């Protein structure tokens, strides 16, 4: 889903190169880590309900598995690109490393619009995706998960196809499964809650009591909905949320300055995270332009939709009141905008730390699936909080002691660990 001006893979490589220079990495390690180790490009023919056959394009990229099996979601999106998948697989490597879980980085995608596919067509697409990859993924090689526009139902179809091909039960092959079918309690909440665990830790360090803060969110999908929920439970006030409207082919921002009722809002939101405009107006919400989320006079901005959303074109619209940006989405800030955010002294929690709750809980799910023993929800969330908080502390302490930005500090920790693993294995 890159646009012509921003290529996420180039951004991911630029970010890596700048940290590799700081770390003085040798040439071979640099070359190995700045690109994926493996890529699969394939076609998926799907029998449509009307009797025709449609051929979809699918990808799976394994960036690096030195620290453990590759791990990463599968996205369904009409504008998916291989460079987006490459970038995301690379970010997964750093993400698993920064929270110190024994997994590498992978990512997959299919160019399709599931909103225009029936249930049965989606099932055939999921099964077709796994048929093309069954020999190259698995609990000890590469473990997929849900991502943009994929969900637990898709994961179970993929697991079923994988198990049918291999002739045995392998619940550790895929994560994000339905609870009761190998899924972990807490997985649905994990990414959004993880965002708020690190945000809360940041606010403590910045002497900003969470209950005195206000926030504006971009996106109202899985990540955003749970982040909003926990942020409000901890006392924060959400005044604006934007989301995409497929019928109008544009985004809108919904605003209520005295705070938003998350349950009421969730009840008028579809499964793709689109808030019903008319119903929202009836509930007293102002409906503003899609970009308005970034212009609000709030303390915290949380981009939780897509990549390349805070750009050189709109970064100047960020209010003087904003003290913290917590990147819940992957790659929401372009490097030129990032530079300006840094110059303005806005405290930015980088994506691969902020949204690592999902993969951390996926790791917990895999551990539970492999053991065939499932934990209570409180246990999962308590373990998640410990992992996220200690990762934040390590990044924050290094940033303070070496006078680094949080993004660079997180990269230094993550890349160092992977470079060490690559060296210890004798690859370079
Ligand atoms: P989702 O599909 O559930 O929700 C996406 C939301 O963004 C929807 O509300 C959609 O309407 C909105 N949106 C799309 N385009 C928009 C636009 N132009 N302006 C405003 N809103 C727009 O996706 P999700 O699972 O919540 O993921 C969101 C982001 O978080 C992605 O970048 C994803 O890669 C990342 N992420 C997700 C997880 C996870 O566990 N789901 C984990 C880590 C990172």
Image: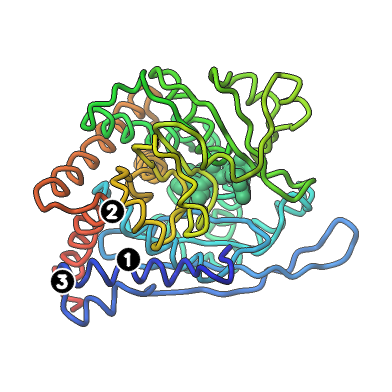
Answer yes or no: is residue 7 visible: yes
Sort mark 3 into few (<14), some (14-19) or many (20+) by Cα contacts within 10 Å. Answer: few
Residue 34, picture quadrant: bottom left
Residue nearest the observer in this picture, 130 or 317: 317
Residue 423's disc number:
3
Q: Which mark is residue 15?
A: 1
Asked where in the image residue 275 lies, by quadrant, the reply is: top right
Mark 1 surroundings within 10 Å by alpha-carbon count, few (fewer than 14), some (14 through 19), many (20 or more): some
Residue sitting farthest toward the right: 50
Q: Residue at x 57, y 22 (%)?
A: 262
Do we see residue 151 in this rendering?
A: no
Q: CA distance from mark 2 to mark 1?
A: 9 Å
Q: Residue at x 38, y 66 (%)?
A: 12
Sequence-first tag of 2 and 1: 1
**Residue at 34% across, 23% down:** 210
For this rendering, which residue is in front, 264 or 168?
264
Residue corresponding to mark 2: 407
Tag 2–tag 1 contact (CB < 8 Å): yes
Q: Which mark is residue 382?
A: none
Give the mark, 2 or 3, whose residue is nearer the N terminus. Answer: 2
Q: Under tag 3, what secondary structure?
A: helix
* Residue 147 point in image, percent of width and height: 53, 49
Q: Position of residue 301 (x, y in %)?
A: 44, 38
Measure the alpha-carbon separation of dots 3 and 1: 21 Å
Dividing the image into four quarters, tell me where ligand 1 lies. top right
**Residue 184 occupies quadrant:** top left
Element class at badge 2: helix
Residue at the spot x=57%, y=50% of the render? 148
Between residues 112 and 10, which one lies in front from this camera angle? 10
Residue 123: image x %, image y %? 70, 52
């Amino acid at each position: 889903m890159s646009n012509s001006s921003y290529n996420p893979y180039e951004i991911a490589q630029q970010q890596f190169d700048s940290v590799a220079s700081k770390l003085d990495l040798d040439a071979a390690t640099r070359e190995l880590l700045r690109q994926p180790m493996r890529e699969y490009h394939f076609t998926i023919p799907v029998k449509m309900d009307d009797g025709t056959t449609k051929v979809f394009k699918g990808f799976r990229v394994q960036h690096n598995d030195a620290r453990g099996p590759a791990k990463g979601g599968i996205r369904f999106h009409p504008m998916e690109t291989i460079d987006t998948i490459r970038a995301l697989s690379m970010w997964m490597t750093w993400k698993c490393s920064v929270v110190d879980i024994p997994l590498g980085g992978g990512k997959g995608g299919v160019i399709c619009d599931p909103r225009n596919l029936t249930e049965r067509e989606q099932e055939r697409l999921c099964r077709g995706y796994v048929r093309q990859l069954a020999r190259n993924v698995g609990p000890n090689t590469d473990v997929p998960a849900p991502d943009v526009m994929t969900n637990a139902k898709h994961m179970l179809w993929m697991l079923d196809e994988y198990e049918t091909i291999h002739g045995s039960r392998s619940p550790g092959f895929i994560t994000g499964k339905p609870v009761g079918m190998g899924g972990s309690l807490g997985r649905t909440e994990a990414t959004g809650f993880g965002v708020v665990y690190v945000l809360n830790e940041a606010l403590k360090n910045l002497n900003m009591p969470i209950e005195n803060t206000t926030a504006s969110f971009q996106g109202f999908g899985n990540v955003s909905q749970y982040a909003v929920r926990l942020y409000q439970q901890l006392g924060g006030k959400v005044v604006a949320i934007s989301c995409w409207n497929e019928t109008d082919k544009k985004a809108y921002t919904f605003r209520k300055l005295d705070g938003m009722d998350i349950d009421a809002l969730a009840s008028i939101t579809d499964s793709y995270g689109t808030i019903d405009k008319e119903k929202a107006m009836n509930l007293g919400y102002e409906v503003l332009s899609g970009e308005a989320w970034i212009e609000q006079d709030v303390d915290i901005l949380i981009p939780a939709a897509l990549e390349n959303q805070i750009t050189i074109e709109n970064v100047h619209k960020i209010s003087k009141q904003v003290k913290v940006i917590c990147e819940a989405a992957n790659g929401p800030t372009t490097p030129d905008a990032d530079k300006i955010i840094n110059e303005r002294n806005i405290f930015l929690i980088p994506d691969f730390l902020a949204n690592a709750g999902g993969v951390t809980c996926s790791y917990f799910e895999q551990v539970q699936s492999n053991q065939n023993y499932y934990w209570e929800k409180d246990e999962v969330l308590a373990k998640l909080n410990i992992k996220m908080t200690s990762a934040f502390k390590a990044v924050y302490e290094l940033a303070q002691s070496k006078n680094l930005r949080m993004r660079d500090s997180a990269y230094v920790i993550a890349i160092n660990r992977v470079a060490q693993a690559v060296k210890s294995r004798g690859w370079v």
